[in-house]
Amino acid sequence: MEPRAFVRLAAPAVAALLALTTACTAGTVQGRPGASGLRDPYFPKAGNGGYQVDHYALDLAYDPADGTLRGTAVITARAEQGLSSFNLDLSGLDVEGVTVQGAKARYNRTGSELTVRPAEDLRKGELFRTEVDYSGRPRVFEDPDGSREGWITHPGGAVGVGEPIGSMAWFPGNHHPSDKAAYDITLTVPDGYEAVSNGELRSRTQRGDGNTAFVWHAPEPMASYLATAAVGTYEVTTGRTASGVRLYTAVAPGEAARSTGALARLPEVLEWGSGRFGPYPFGAAGAIVLPGGTLEYALETQTRPLFPGAPEESLVVHELAHQWFGNSVSPRSWKDMWLNEGFATYAEWLWAEEHGGNTAQESFDAFLEGDTETEPAAGSDWDAFPPAAPPGPEHISGNPVYFRGAMVLHRIRQEVGDEKFFALLRGWASEHRHGNASTADFTAYAAKSTGHDLGKVWDTWLYGERRPPAP
């Protein structure tokens, strides 16, 4: 807002002007800056305050030959307060222009914060549209635990991965799992490449300029760390499950033969999960198998998990279970990661139990006894800390989050019996479908839905600092 000139007026005129001003401004915006972080326990600067995103429209162009990403992000959000400015998370890349509600906006960069100042303050409750044009060579992050995320290149392509904060390397946004949104992602790549993202492929168009545009539509709410963009020379297969879920699987050529067996069971795993956890929460599913050596880990990217080379069957089960636990029901903060990983690990145990492998009880016992022949991970430090209270950001993907988290679920099963336990799993997935939930939400829901006092399970297995004794 430009400063206005000061004019001396006679006292009566001043009084009249003040009265008129008061009347005209009674309903005006009381704008203030949105917070530059959501104070997550482990990543306090992640996300931004003052608004919630409804929809991302990302138009991205990437050429593996030069490694430059060019993008336009159109972000539709609703103001939760009057806003004089707000922040977006974006690391690296050059911002070339920003508009808000179609008007040019001022902006500045500080670290990974892009601060935007609209031409007009935004009203509380107002739905507003922000457009950001940007380009550059996206960066790679090293997580606190030493793993890599962000925009990862490999010979012949690249992939965007975001857990926990890497998505800010390739698009601006409100990058915290508590702010979920729908996505439309257009990926333009040189002819001969495949470009794979979340949801359903709406169109694939050769533009006549040597490039092909792939348009992906993901209508269900998605946390930004679950968004992906994979560019490469993939072998693509499509189909449907027995219940009609669309399948789209992309496999790096060198991994195709070794991936066939595990990926062939993908439809079966989805149908099994729907029986155990309730209806599959999305309209599409599939997988992306990356060239070996691209990543050190698999990731449950929404509707289309990423695998670092040919996966084993148990890993397919794990990442597909995340579509219910972690993707549809997302953590309220990064402290709640056991609600993702403990549940997906226990899904592996259930799958094995029902398909000729170890029972869940045998897996549970193997951890207690350190039996690495029955359960190879049993020699890990599963008891190093309580799964609901990782000691730092480097521990949110630690072994206790996965394995002791799964053991918490098995202890509930032991306490309440199979009928109430499996009703709990289905009810939890339904109660928070496409939403967010915390550990406190789960403990309250488990006690209410089962009718059991589970305080000792929480105290000993979920929050206890010492190694839990055999029950």
Image (tube, rainbow, N blue to C red):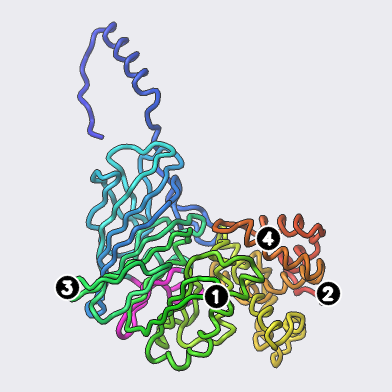
Q: Where is residue 78 shown, x and y percent of the image?
A: 42, 45
Tell me the amino acid under the disc marked 3.
Gly
The residue lying toward the viewer, choosing from 95 and 353, is 353
At label 2, which amino acid type do we have? Answer: Pro
The residue at the far left in this view is 209
Pick the quarter of the image with the C terminus. bottom right
Point out residue 59 in the picture as x, y percentages from the top left corner.
Answer: 29, 63
Say what amino acid the circle numbered 1 marks.
Answer: Ala
Mark 4 to mark 3: distance in Å? 50 Å
Give the position of the N terminus as an image quadrant.
top left
- Kindly identify which residue carries mark 2: 471
Q: Residue at x 68, y 68 (%)?
A: 386
Q: Can residue 441 be seen in the rendering of this structure?
A: yes
Residue topped by disc 3? 208
Q: CA distance from mark 4 to mark 1?
A: 23 Å
Q: Amino acid at mark 4?
A: Gly
Whichever of callouts 1 and 2 sits on the residue coming sooner in the sequence is 1
What residue is disc 4 on?
427
